[in-house]
Image (cartoon, coloured by chain):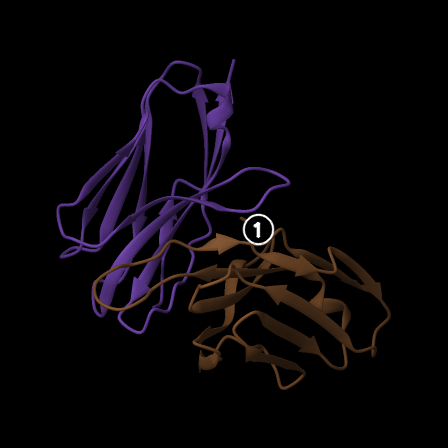
Chain colours: A purple, B brown
Amino acid sequence: ILNVEQSPQSLHVQEGDSTNFTCSFPSSNFYALHWYRWETAKSPEALFVMTLNGDEKKKGRISATLNTKEGYSYLYIKGSQPEDSATYLCAPQNRDDKIIFGKGTRLHILP
Amino acid sequence: DAGVIQSPRHEVTEMGQEVTLRCKPISGHDYLFWYRQTMMRGLELLIYFNNNVPIDDSGMPEDRFSAKMPNASFSTLKIQPSEPRDSAVYFCASSLRGAGAYTGELFFGEGSRLTVL
């Protein structure tokens, strides 16, 4: 797996606003797409693992979609709260179960 | 349940010394991954194991790095000799992939912060 790209690198969002960011990955040899949330001074924690094209998953105010044919996934946060401030990492998994991380989108929620 | 346990949490050593980082995965998990985190490169995959067997070590930077998994409940990452550019946080993560189509999320340890002077 090469070239896992996440954009933007950093994002400032007003509390209460909704936001989204992108992960793009090579679509060949694809098996699954992981999203993780990484708070400062902690370890990454899984949000979603998706495998099917068109898959959409939701956890509270956070949701994600997956397009395996074109190789991208979106993460959406509705009504941002201060506790959403974190780095969001995506990681494609190939059919050999190799999991490579993007560099993440750092989200800052402004009060 | 205990999560992934890594030791030491912090290690400061001098250039040329041997460093051994340890990881105990979650009981029953069949995959174990070692990652290195730096500001420049983010989370880099070093090596991963399935059922204690190394599957892909193409991310190991040099021959100075080696990793073993002698049994299902223990893995080590060794750097010998260490260099200042090895300074980073090293994470171990485990997952349950199992058989069939189930895909397991990664569970991370708290990381080992290595400083090589």
Q: Residue at x 37, y 69 (%)?
A: A98
Q: Is A85 left or right of B30, judged from the image as shown?
A: right
Type of the residue with mark 1: Ala
Give the total of numbered labels: 1
SS for tag 1? loop
Which residue occupies the foreground of this view, B63 or B5? B5
- Horizontal relation, residue A17 to residue A12: left or right: left
Residue at the spot x=83%, y=79% of the render?
B16
Badge 1 density bin: few <14, some 14–19, many ≥20, Cα 10 Å: few
Residue A70 lies left or right of residue B14; in this view the side is left
Where is residue B66 shown, x and y percent of the image?
Answer: 62, 81
Residue identifier under label 1: B2
Q: Quadrant of the C terminus of chain B?
A: bottom right
Percent x, y of residue A50: 25, 50
Q: What percent of the width, then of the height, locates residue B59?
A: 50, 75
Q: Identify the residue at horizontal 39%, vertical 40% (top origin).
A: A8
Residue A108's place in the image compared with B106, above or below, is: above
Within the image, what quadrant is residue B21 found in? bottom right
Nearer the observer, A59 or A94? A59
Query: Which quadrant of the structure image shows residue B67?
Result: bottom right
Q: What residue do we see at 59% from left, 80% from top? A: B68
B25, B67: nearer the viewer: B25
Whether residue B117 can be seen here: no
Question: Residue B84 at what x, y percent from top left?
Answer: 77, 68
Chain for mark 1? B
Vertical placement of B85 versus B1: above or below?
below
Toward the viewer: B52 or A23? Answer: B52
Can residue B7 be spotted in the picture? yes
